[in-house]
Image (spheres, rainbow, N blue to C red):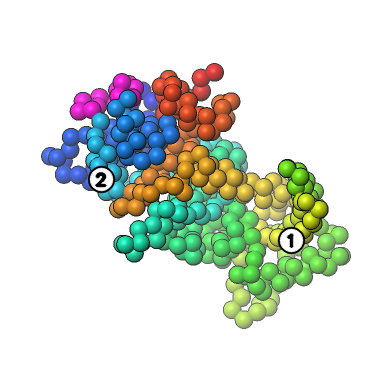
Amino acid sequence: MSQVAGPRSLLDHFSALEDPRQQWRVVYPLPEILLLVLGATLSGMEDFVEIRLWGEERLDFLRRFLPYERGIPSHDTLGDVINALDPELFKHCFLEWAAGLRDDEPEVIAIDGKTSRRSHARTKGRGPLHLVSAWASRQRLVLGQEAVETKSNEIAAIPLLLKNLELTGALVTIDAIGTQVEIARAITEGGGDYLLALKANRPALLADVETFFADPANLAACRSYDTADGDHGRIEQRRHSVSHDVGWLQSDRRYPDERIFPGLAAIAMVEATTTHDARVRHEKRYYIASAQLDARAFAAAVRAHWGIENRLHWVLDVVFHDDLARLRSGHGPQNMAVVKHMAMNLIRHPKDRHSLKNRRKLACLNPDYLETLIRNQPQLT
C-alpha cells in the first residue's frame, strides 16, 4: 500500500501488528485482511460474511493496493484473525495513526463511554463491550479508545487513555464520572486543561459551587453568555456563567480528607430553560476548570463536548449500526471497534457534500470514491 498519500501509508502504521497465526500456515497475509475489512466497513458491510462477499466483488479494486494472490479468505478465516489480533497493539497502532491526522491548532478533546449492547456473551459470562473514547471536537476525529468491562470502570480507563494522547494546549472535557483528582492531575501534567462536570459524586464540592452561584451578588459579578436553540417545537435557552473567584475553594482545609483539584482556575454554571409542548423545564449544571475560560469559550466547550454523543456515538449506532453488531468471540469486539473508528476518521472529509450515510453508500458503489477515502485524499466532486 505504498501509494497511499501522506508521510506514512495507512497500513504502514499497523505494520507492528503480529500475525497471530503460525507463519507456515499463513495463506492470506495480514495486511490484505486488514485492508479488506477496512474497505468493506467503509462500504457498509457489517459482518464477516458480508465482508467476504464484498471482497469477491471488489477484488480488482483491492489489487490496486496489494496483490491478493490467493484471492479472498473465507468469513471464518476473517473472524479467526480479527478475534485473535492483540487488541492492545492494534489500539496503539490506531493511536499513532490518528495522532498523525491532527493539526496543530488548539482542540477540545471530549472523553465519554459507549456500550455496544449486543456484544455480550452470556454463556461465557462476558458482558457487552464498553468503550471509552477520545474525540477531537473541532476536527471530528476519534483519537483513541480504551475498553472496559462496565461503565463503572471508566474511572480506571480514563487515565490510561489520557496517557496515550497528546494533550498540550488541549481542553479536555469529561462528564461527572471523570471528575476525579487523579484524572485532573493526569490532564494538567500532560500539558492540557480540564473542564469537568460536577454532580452528586462530589457532594461537598457540588454543594459549595451551588451555594456560590445561588448568591445574587456572586452571580452579578460573573461573566455571562447566552445561547438559544430551537428544533421541532422545542426551544432551549441557556445562560453560561463563569467565575474565576476560586481562592476560597483552595484556602484552608474545609472538610476532613478533602482533596484539591490541581490548577483549579474557574467554576461555571449553565442555566437551561427548555420549552416544549407548553411545558417548561429548568435545569442547572455545574463545572470546574483549570483554564481561565471566559463565558463564551465555556459555552463553546460545553457544546463541543456533546459532539461526542451526536457525532460519534450516534453515528456509530445509526450509520454503522454498532448496537446491532453481534460479534462476541475473542478480541473481535474490541478490534472491530478500532476498525470502525478508523472508518469514521477516513469518512469525515470536511469538503465532502454527502451525508455520512451516503458516503458509505457511494464508497460501495464507486471504487474511485472509496480509493480517495482509503488514501485520505480530497474527495471527488
The residue wearing badge 1 is: 284
Neighbour class for label 1 at 10 Å: few (<14), some, many (≥20)? few
**Magenta residues, as a range?**
58-71
Neighbour class for label 2 at 10 Å: few (<14), some, many (≥20)? some
Residue 284 position (above or below residue 108) = below
Residue 170 visible in image? no
**Residue at (24% x, 34% y) in the render:** 73
As drawn, which residue projects farthest toward the top? 381
Amino acid type at mark 1: Lys
Residue 181 locus on image (x, y percent): 56, 66
The image quarter in which residue 221 lies: bottom right
In this view, the residue in front, 96 or 149, is 149
Which quadrant is home to the C terminus? top right
Residue 327 visible in image? yes
* Residue 94 marker: none
Counting labels gives 2
